[in-house]
Image (cartoon, rainbow, N blue to C red):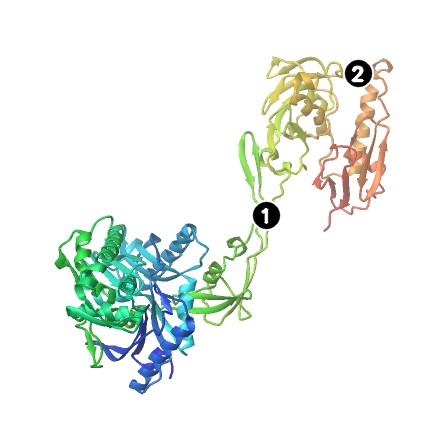
Amino acid sequence: MGGVKSQGSLVFGLDIGTRSIVGTVGYKADDGFHVLAQEIKEHESRAMLDGQIHDIGKVGNTILEVKKNLESRLGKQLGEVCIAAAGRVLRTVTVNVAEDFESEKEITDEDIYNLSMSGIEQAYTEFQSQNDTDMKFYCVGYTPVRYYLNGYQIGNLEGHKAKKISADLIATFLPDDVVDGLYKAVEHAGLHVANLTLEPIAAIQVAIPDKFRLLNLALVDVGAGTSDISITKDGSIIAYGMIPVAGDSLTDVIVQKCLVDFDMAEHIKRSLRTGEPEIEFTDIMGLPQKVKAAEITEALAPYIDDMTSRVSDEIKKLNGDKPVSAVFVVGGGGMVPGYTEKLSESLGILKERVAIRGEDVMKEIIFEDKDAHKDSLMVTPIGICLSFYAQSNNFIFVTFNGERLKLYDNGHLSVSDAALQVAFPNEDLFPKRGKAITFTIGGKSRIVRGTEGESSQILINDEPADLYTQIHSGDIIEVKASTPGSDAAFKLGELAELKTPIKISVNGKIFEFPKKALVNGELQETFYEIQDGDDIKVNNFYTVEQITEFLDTPAAGDIKVNQTPAVLKTKVYEDFTLDYTIGSHDHKTSKSEKPSAKEDGAESETADAAENTSVSGASDQPASGGVSFADLPDDDGTAAEMKEKMAEMSEAEEGEKTEEEKPEGPDLTTQVSVNANGRMLTLTGKESYVYVDVFDKLNFDLKAGNGRKIITKLNGKNAQYLEPIKDGDVIEVRWEEK
């Protein structure tokens, strides 16, 4: 027959305990849960210890017997089953999770679900950081403790309007080997898991109905190997816990005292519940024996003291270091005489407030199977069935990049959940930026980020998907890691601080002087690639000497800055005025008169480099003597016009001079080699060279423009005709394309 869902309302639940396996089949109706059939089978050997399966095959065979007996009684086949895991190594994490909305909205069931999922993710992250073992854990359940609407506690968020919702949530985790052992044992019996819950969650479904959860109560499920604990308060389950001591520890005491095997010791322990003064048994020698019940009770007393003390300590720890108002006890281990009395003493509450819960809490359970047990042993098995209706949880199997995964199915699993499970690097899921450059400019830190790479490529069953695509059992997921982008690259000239020139009035004419920068104390050109950690300082001034050298107009006579007498070292800032008489080249400051690097530090370095920098006039006013750059054609004129104009001005200036006024001939020994349009050219015969000098050597037809503008570039940047050039420069000259 098909699975549980295809069986209509029929649900098959298995309580796989340390001593026995209880199978229950029933269905839920308006009047309660109907138990159609129940089957109990003890393990033939100690195949389970402390709630942990040790022999999967033997446990699987016992499950198979229970399944066959139930099928025989019902006349139906059972294919799927609900199970519960013991809390032997249960770990819990309590988190507060919140979600803010852009504006006030009505809260839907989907909003509440998304809030819970965010809480589980947050709990998983916290748990992973606290997990100090090598064991792999799975989240096997969660419980919302309380909800908040705009910061105020509320019972149910749905339907209310809010801008912010939040919740306190408990997430529970179990090791993979516990969950895996349960699944394999069930599969050994030919069954598939329809729902997995925790034993304390299952027990509380029956033992503490919702109407009692407003009270501060504890539920203790005393099994054979573990004692599972739940705490309720203010209408919610607020904590889960466990101690690894339960009924089997008492049975082991009887084994030693009466010299019997484990099964006979179990018989003696259960006989204590009958109230008979003497108990008959057979020892390991095969001899019949009798023992007074009081002797056994006395022998067990110190162990019951220890067990109840540990349970009491755990209850107080889970309840904020204080006792609860009352305790309900379920499970066979708690039925030993003296257990409830000792627990009440340890907690410091009235003995009447610690009681075994059995048939009295099963008023909404209809037993159609007349042979079914109705004591505290049946609370958890029936609760396992009821948990199917409260939450449908399961594990699914998928393949992620060739690795088979088992995932806890919350109904909304996505690719990101699978990636999280295999610890796929988060940085490989999202686009990666190239390395950034961090530097300082003017003492302030600045960062230039690298470019983003491509996002990860995701396929599910060979179909394109993304991180949020839902996944299902059997899916084959392939994720190709995202790629890194390019590392940051930034030239000095791209800084905004260098793009605005310094405007200075020289002899009544406005000139624009490009700003220069020192990198780590050294002057660098605009095409310098900024490196990580560079310290950049922008010079926002020129010295008088630098200006005269830039303009190639030596100063003669008085120098005034802002109408105040000045010297060559005087700094000239933005919007300052500089006035001086322009002399001939024989009046240039000699090298001995120039400030040395030692005397003027970085300013001297700036002045030396300034000889290779161009300036352009920004006013139509004539200069007061000498050759004015304003007389030259604009940059959009042709190189031929430029050369022709320079020649005319040179001839006019020479005509005004007498033979005695002509300066001595310059040193013609300097030569410069440049790459011009892919050819290496060597310029000779001058002290220094500017861009337009290349045309003397370059085979470029200046008459072939046909009205087009000439494009001039120096080291990849637009160049002016009078821009200085030096060894190794790369020059490009071409006509603009129309």
Residue 449 against residue 725 in the figure, above or below: below
Q: Name the residue under label 2.
A: 586
Q: Which residue is at a point 76% across and 42% down the rendered structure image?
A: 732
Q: Residue 543 carries which label?
A: none
Q: Can residue 9 be seen in this view?
A: yes
Q: Where is residue 675 in the image (x, y as percent from the top left)?
A: 80, 40
Q: Name the residue under label 1.
A: 434
Name the amino acid type tagged 1.
Answer: Gly
In this rendering, which labeled residue sits more in front, label 2 or label 1?
A: 1
618 vs 216: above or below:
above
Residue at 66% in and 26% down: 621
Residue 162 location in percent, x, y? 29, 55
Real-space Cα separation, disc 2 to disc 1, in angstroms: 55 Å
Q: Where is residue 493, by image quadrant?
A: top right
> Within the image, what quadrant is residue 39 found in?
bottom left
Name the image quarter holding residue 440: top right
Q: For the point 45% across and 70% down, which residue is it?
A: 472
Horizontal side, residue 488 vs residue 276: left or right = right
